Image (cartoon, rainbow, N blue to C red):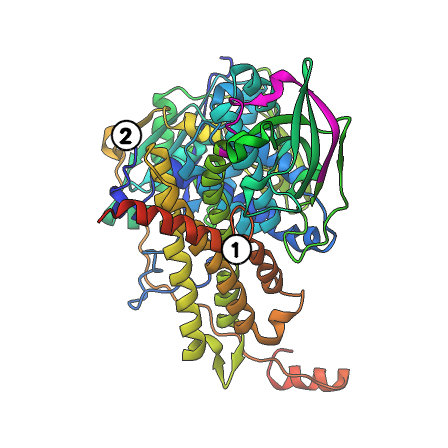
Amino acid sequence: QLHHRSLSSLAGLPEMHQMMRQTCRDYADRELAPIAGKLDKEHLFPAQQVRELGAMGVMAVEVPEALGGAGMDYLAYSLAVEEISRGCGSTGCVVSVNNSLYIGPILKFGTPEQKDQWITPFTTGEKVGCFALSEPGNGSDAGAASTLARQEGGEWVLNGTKAWISNCWDASATVVFATTDKSLKHKGISAFLVPMPHPGLSLGKKEDKLGIRANSTANLILEDCRIPLGNMLGPRGSGFKIAMQTLDGGRIGIASQALGIAQAALDCAVDYAHKRTAFGAPIGKLQAVQFKLADMAVAVESARLLTWKAAMLKDAKKPFTKEAAMAKLSASEAATFCGHQSIQVLGGMGYVTDMPAERHYRDARITEIYEGTSEIQRLVIAGQLLKEYVP
Amino acid sequence: MSPASVFVCLSLTLLSDYPVIRVKPDNSGVVTDGVKHSMNPFCEIAVEEAVKLKEKKFIKEVVAVSCGPTQVTETIRTALAMGCDRGIHVEVSGKDYEAMGPLQIAKIFAALAKKEEASLVILGKQAIDDDCNQTGQMTAALLDWPQGTFASEVTIDGEKVKVVREIDGGLETIKISMPAVLTADLRLNTPRYATLPNIMKAKKKKIANMKPADLGVDMVSRVEVLRVDEPPTRLAGVKVETVDDLVAKLKANGTI
């Protein structure tokens, strides 16, 4: 068991974590990296790979074995997402959304029956879930949710539109947030479980995105969508709390995804620096290139340690909100930095699809936006700091 | 004797696709410090075959065995995560490890196979760092057991094993009695990825520790490495315009 103070022992991760990291790395190298370009170009959902990852336990890392998961900790999950994302950023997103955003809240707030029904079938990779919080009118302003839920007899009836929902075109269920008591403002939001497809639930057109194109993103439209009363997740009015706690964990997932993309960009640049010659020698001999590689490596490694720390705090059941926000902020900015500099090191070759650098650049960009923009992360960090320092 | 336990003998090798393997400055060998090591790919195939035979209920127990320093336990643990039941680590380190070659390893494996009454010993056909392709054959000879090497297909048929072997001329099918030694070739199977739940389970599986002396094996090498050199640097080629030019050039440099 790792304690958050034993960071110095992270020079060697526990044996089990190392093995797990290696198996995910092998899978990413052999099965994902070779097809990532194609998945991106053709906007293809990696259904077969998701099933294979499910069989390996990667789609439900933290879920107890009794429910069909791998029964590992959040540090293991972070390592898995990073390695998968290093092979394919889109696939990393599918893994992260399923683990953190869909299974996460149900694992924490669901009844035993809900866990059986809504988690177990989603551990195998046969089915994936999604998380519907954002709306066209509010992303960062989550408390202003305008999707409504009214009770009619033995059913909840949902109405509203959710925006930017990752995985939705390939999902078989969603966690949806809707207002049950408008007068209570953000304390009047509740969480619901809705199967997909379902009468009253339809999907908007697939967004044509800059990056993570193999992962579907679209609006989720609810028009008198009727679900049983038993489909409410957690107590009435606790939706906002559920969303915020879920996003705390989700941030570690996205930080890990960003790390994977950043590392892939760095690897690409280092490899090129060995092979490309200019001015009579490999360009890795030039200080201008060396400084870039060094800056990239420091950015990734420091973000990685922040991510591991956040994961370890979560595993130790200690408060981790600030660290998770720091991890997501630094990892996403490391990803965009590395994506950018990697293209710079490759020069013209970085601008064409023959090399993966341009895909890493495009994939990286979303990590500074979803699951809490970099600006929101800064607010979260500052909020925690100000709370800690009472003069 | 119905198939009881199968020994899978593993080798920890240098990764062959690692960017640069360097020869030591004193030409006594290659630099292994800091170079990534992992389970030999042919040994992965051997593990997969043994686990498959167990899943098909032909054998009861798969034991993963390896010789070497502490690092080797990681390899055994990976084999356990792929489905082996228990492991044995024969500790060899320092000078003994540097001098360790196929004969010493074969002696250890043979002694263990006899001691534990194995019915099958499966190895990778060769290690990708030294490419010796000897350990399996030597183990069989020391045990005086039949061998099915370069196996691309293995079928257990009662007390016998049918082995399809990849040979230069094509494929050869043989039937050998157990106990026997098999070595795995590339097309025998595609090794599975260790799943996360199996990695967790592997934690609880036992790895026994022993030394070559416990098995009465002497580690003295009969082979002395005199010198290791890098292959000569590849020279640039020369382009010619016609076939006559080509023939003339080949005659001029003594090739023909």
Q: Report whether residue B220 is seen.
A: no
Instruction: Give the extent of the magenta segment.
Output: A220-240
- Does the segment drawn in magenta span residue A172? no
> Residue at label 2?
B209
* Comparing labels 2 and 1, the label whose residue is closer to the camera: 1
Which is nearer the eye, A383 or A287?
A383
The reply, left or right, for residue B172 in relation to residue B217 is: right
The residue pinned by badge 1 equals A368
Q: Quadrant of residue B93?
A: top left
The answer to whether B225 is drawn above or below residue A170 in the figure is below
Task: Please give the chain letter of the residue carrying mark 1.
Answer: A
Residue A52 image position (x, y, % from top left) = 61, 35
Decide whether residue A238 is among the magenta residues. Answer: yes
From this viewpoint, is residue A231 visible? yes
Residue B242: image x %, image y %? Answer: 77, 85
In the image, is residue A117 above or below residue B217?
A: above
Q: Is residue B185 above or below residue B224?
A: above
Task: Establish whether labels 2 and 1 are both on one chain.
Answer: no
Amino acid type assigned to the residue bearing label 1 in the image: Glu
Label 2 and label 1: CA atoms lie apart by 50 Å
Residue, x 42% and y 78% (percent of image)? A285
Q: Residues within 10 Å of mark 2 (few under 14, many from 20)?
A: few
Q: Nearer the viewer, residue A28 or B192?
A: A28
Q: Quadrant of residue A293?
A: bottom left
Q: Secondary structure at mark 2?
A: strand
In the image, is residue B135 above or below residue A345? above
Q: Residues within 10 Å of mark 1 (few under 14, many from 20)?
A: many
